[in-house]
Image: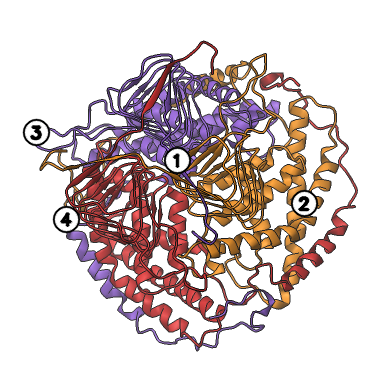
Chain colours: A orange, B purple, C red
């Protein structure tokens, strides 16, 4: 088999195969449909048949976009924004966000309500109430995100301006979405916060559970592979690099063998801690004291006092002269 | 250079630069075009000039969406689905999927056929036949994916419901796409399966080659950085965490120095194995025995017996008191 | 709480909640808007109010698509391309790319100009000039990318054809975008190159700073988690695997405590170096000599001579027989 590419490629190029006229496969599709429908009355398959709309990843991404346009006005609309119409545009953006968010929170609550046969959760009222509470926090969100942007500028010599951070940095994108999702998580909105942070994970490779608590001036550089678990606590001015895991040790199970889904399983990082690339810190009782620096590739399952530098004593390297053709 | 942002920004803001009227660059574009066309008769560039459509990543993603709507009915359409019209909607979805898949398989086969000057592969007939065989497997696919969803619920204390797994978990997204692609790979469809798993890789950071063999109840948590090579074999109820590589040792080459593209190069994991974050298991002869647990950050190039717990003796840490201003 | 799914789901499914009629939250939105507008006259928030369009990630992605259609003609349009109309289509593609690129470069320069109160940078003229210079390099770009495609085919036993590399490989996608962005970076276009490489990062998990210097026949396999810093120098025929970091040691600061943003902070890899998965090489003075092989999971902060194989002496493993129910 010789591989041909470029203009040596056969000039006429069209396929000599007679297009198959027969429909012999297609006419048998109803048997596939029947089989699939039968599999739906089976405990061992999942389906979600209900006339009420479900929360949707696409709409969650849309809500995030609306938030970003309000949190960082003028940055992400792709065209200019003038001083005069700015306040009108903001007014429109705010009411649009409120409507979308109220609807999506309602869907999320109603989904739980019906799915688990709970008594009425007053989803519509709750959706509006929680959406409004979220709106009231937008200004605070702007302030804390500004500290994150400044932390990125201070922390990375490759960055040339605040605008570059806001435009380009996946860390800022992930932190923005985490902070939005965390607000909703605190308001006890089901499902939607997780959909949002998994959207961020997909865009950036940074996986922050919306339940984590993270202080101001938080900086994640590069970020791919970062995992921050649900019960993690992070203080102010903390810096993380790519591939850092703040995770759980082996999970506790109760007497019945069920997972313990409530206890603190993930570590605590106090103010001004830095964790370099590829390090793993595990366990709910693990506390990293203030201002400590955790070197790259470290594996920690116990606490570290404040003002400590932890370095890996790097494993011995074996160097040998390469033999010619000796791979 | 002072950085200004916020309302201190110049009020009128428009650029004083006279818009350049000249066309002095644009009129020279034909020389760029000529140069590019000349580079096409050159062995050292790639192009693909042919009137038959090529397989496309966009359409592959579309086929995956169609599959997901059939495999998990009602979850991903973003609006409700009622009991009455469900079976009609499923019927429409099935015939749409069949048509799209038959066309794309045909393109993939025809591409190989023309590209490598093979004798006629009867691409159109093959496309319909293989697409129909795929359709017949959809119910089994639903069953095995249900075991994967349950494994995620059982394996992660942070998850609150099966629906959350299906909506949010990148592991389930990657496994769903892998299982679709693996079916097509087994049907010897060229190119399309790889396009699908690389789409999953891009969405989730999880890179599973469609050739790998993976048993039921498979769970990947977080997942970013997971790599599962082409000749990997994975048993039932296996759990992997982020950053796990199941890879190859240095590649064998034949006498002519060509890569050996056929032999088993990737490891085997038996039933009920767990591999924690950041571990690397390499080599086609490496077998991890049933129920064994491989701790985080481990590096393995030889076999492990069944019922074994392998832990890294963590490299020594050096701790020193941080000097003030001593970074 | 019993979890119900499948057809046991309540048949009528609709929510019993009276839809809330009240507007009691929505009428209070103006207070949210006022609060947000007030926060805009605050130093501690970011906004970007200006009538001139900003560079945009969406348009950057669009420019990358245009480039790919010119660099790999026929591969990515999803339908066929015939020999006759090929040159006309290329002509249209070239002039479209020029116009879009000139506009986006102009926006990027004007943004800097206004943002930092610089004297007029003649953004419109510069945009056209730099875009045209970029166009003149497209043929060279095709040649060097062809070496990258061939390197992937030579380097990976799982690949079956050049076309598979071009269609599927995230490494080729990331390298293509890096080479485009690097050209613009060399032309001193602000912001846009970073937006482009962060787009690649988001798609592939591979984070290459546009400032890095990378020779021909460059191959990245799998790629998730790869980080290549701004002042990295990479020779010809270099291979990297997933999770490799070519990064900086702790940053230098000047007397005033400001970050040194100019010096070489990232390593140099000479010709024919291979770095296996998960390895980290740090520091501007670190040089890896030609033809050397760096084994997986290695951590290097000093130079390695040419023709050397560096292997991790793997940390001791502790194996213990698993107790029954002993996790």
* Chain of the residue displaying label 1: B
- Res. C299 visible in picture: yes
Per the image, the residue denoted by label 4 is B43
Per the image, the residue denoted by label 3 is B255
* Chain of the residue displaying label 4: B
* Chain of the residue displaying label 2: A
Element class at badge 1: strand
Report the disc number at residue B274: none
Question: Which mark is nearer the camera, 4 or 1?
Answer: 1
Looking at the picture, tell me which residue is in the foreground, A66 or B7: B7
User: Above or below — where is C254 with respect to A97?
Assistant: below
> Residue B70 occupies which quadrant of the picture?
top right
Residue located at (32% from left, 75% from top): C133
- Res. B53 visible in picture: no
Per the image, the residue denoted by label 1 is B317
Measured Cα–Cα span from mark 1 to mark 2: 44 Å
């Amino acid at each position: 088999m010789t591989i041909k590419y470029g203009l040596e490629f056969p000039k006429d190029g069209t396929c000599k195969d007679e297009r198959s006229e027969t429909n012999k496969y297609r006419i048998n599709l109803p048997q596939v449909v029947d089989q699939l429908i039968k599999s739906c009355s089976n405990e061992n398959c999942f389906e979600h048949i209900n006339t009420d709309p479900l929360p949707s990843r696409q709409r969650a991404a849309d809500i995030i976009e609306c938030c970003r346009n309000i949190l960082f006005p003028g940055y992400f609309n792709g065209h200019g924004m003038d001083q005069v119409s700015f306040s009108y545009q903001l007014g429109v953006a705010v009411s649009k966000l409120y409507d979308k968010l109220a609807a999506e929170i309602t869907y999320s609550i109603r989904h739980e309500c019906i799915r688990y046969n709970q008594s009425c959760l007053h989803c519509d009222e709750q959706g509006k109430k929680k959406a409004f509470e979220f709106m009231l926090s937008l200004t605070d969100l702007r302030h804390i995100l500004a500290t994150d942007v400044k932390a990125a500028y201070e922390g990375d010599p490759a960055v040339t301006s605040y605008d570059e951070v806001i435009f380009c940095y996946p860390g800022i994108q992930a932190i923005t979405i985490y902070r939005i999702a965390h607000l909703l998580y605190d308001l006890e909105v089901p499902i939607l916060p997780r959909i949002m942070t998994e959207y961020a994970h997909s865009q950036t490779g940074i996986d922050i559970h919306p339940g984590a608590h993270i202080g101001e001036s938080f900086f994640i550089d590069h970020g791919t592979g970062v995992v921050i678990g649900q019960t993690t606590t992070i203080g102010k001015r903390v810096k993380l690099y790519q591939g850092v895991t703040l995770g759980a040790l082996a999970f506790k199970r109760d007497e019945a063998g069920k997972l313990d889904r409530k206890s603190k399983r993930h570590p605590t990082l106090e103010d001004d801690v830095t964790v370099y690339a590829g390090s793993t810190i595990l366990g709910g009782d693990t506390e990293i004291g203030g201002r400590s620096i955790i070197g790259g590739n470290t594996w920690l399952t116990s606490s570290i006092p404040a003002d400590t530098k932890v370095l890996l004593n790097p494993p011995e390297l074996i160097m040998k002269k390469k033999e010619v053709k000796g791979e």
